[in-house]
Amino acid sequence: MTRIKELPLTALQFYATAPYPCSYLPGREARSQVAAPGHLIHAGTYSHLVDEGFRRSGLFTYRPHCDDCQACIPVRVDTERFSANRTQLRSVKRHQNLRPFVAELAWSEEHFKLYARYQTMRHPGGGMDEDSRSQYSQFLLASRVNTRLVEFREEDGTLRMVSIIDVLEQGLSSVYTFYDPDIKGSLGTYGIMWQINQCRQLKLPWLYLGYWIADSQKMAYKAGFTPTQYRWDGQWRDTPPPTTVCI
């Protein structure tokens, strides 16, 4: 058990979990550091925790705490200085007819069916493609912070994408996005571009994209939204660490 000795985090305690199989690097074990008690983690406190490299999964706030590995690097996009590349601009143009709607953070059978299709097609065998309804709800619909659920629909009302986003004091945190896996043109890229634009409209300097892992192909896209900052050795830096290889 440890404490982070900076206000407003002094009331929290931090516990290390038991080892569990790593979701991103085959054959590796992972551990997490979990912030508790959860009922004290309100929007302001969570903003500070995200700046310390934490994320949340439902009501659990955590960051990687592996014994022999530091491959998970928190990343954030500098939204004021961000400059889109051609691929990113093409994704915006391709999906410019989608209409965003902020919906209630609540159960929707329509959302769940899209989520299940996305998991089955995009992450088969990854453990999440068999999620039950209760697991989906705990993962995406449980929150004590300022969370928005944004639907993206065609003009005829067809649902194409859902993004779960936390609103922080210093930016937006991209919690999770799932979309129609049959639609071409990189809906995931479009979703991040939309979130960057939201940051600009709200005058928030950062979009937090979670963890980037140099050796994980699934995470490679996060370094493509530049300029990107990486958090290592306790600071946010403009360059990734010299090495993120596990021992």
Image (tube, grey):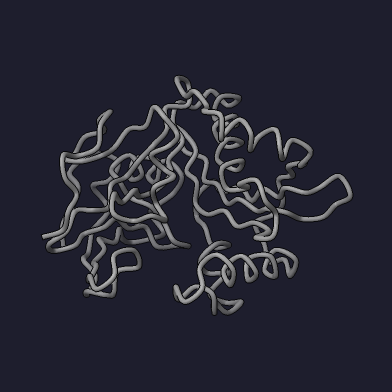
- Residue at 57% across, 48% down: 188
Q: Is residue 169 visible in the rendered structure shown here? A: no
Q: Quadrant of the C terminus?
A: bottom left
In percent of width and height, residue 232 lies at 20, 41
Q: Hey, which quadrant is residue 101 in on the image?
A: top right
**Residue lying furthest right in this view?**
156
The residue lying toward the viewer, choosing from 123 and 105, is: 123
Q: Hey, which quadrant is residue 50 in on the image?
A: top left
Q: Quadrant of the N terminus?
A: bottom left
- Would you say 79 lies left or right of 197 here? left
* Vertical order, 242 against 141 (above or below): above
- Would you say 244 lies left or right of 104 here? left
In percent of width and height, residue 88 lies at 56, 34
- Residue at 35% across, 68% down: 23
The residue lying toward the viewer, choosing from 181 and 165, is: 181
In percent of width and height, residue 111 lies at 70, 63
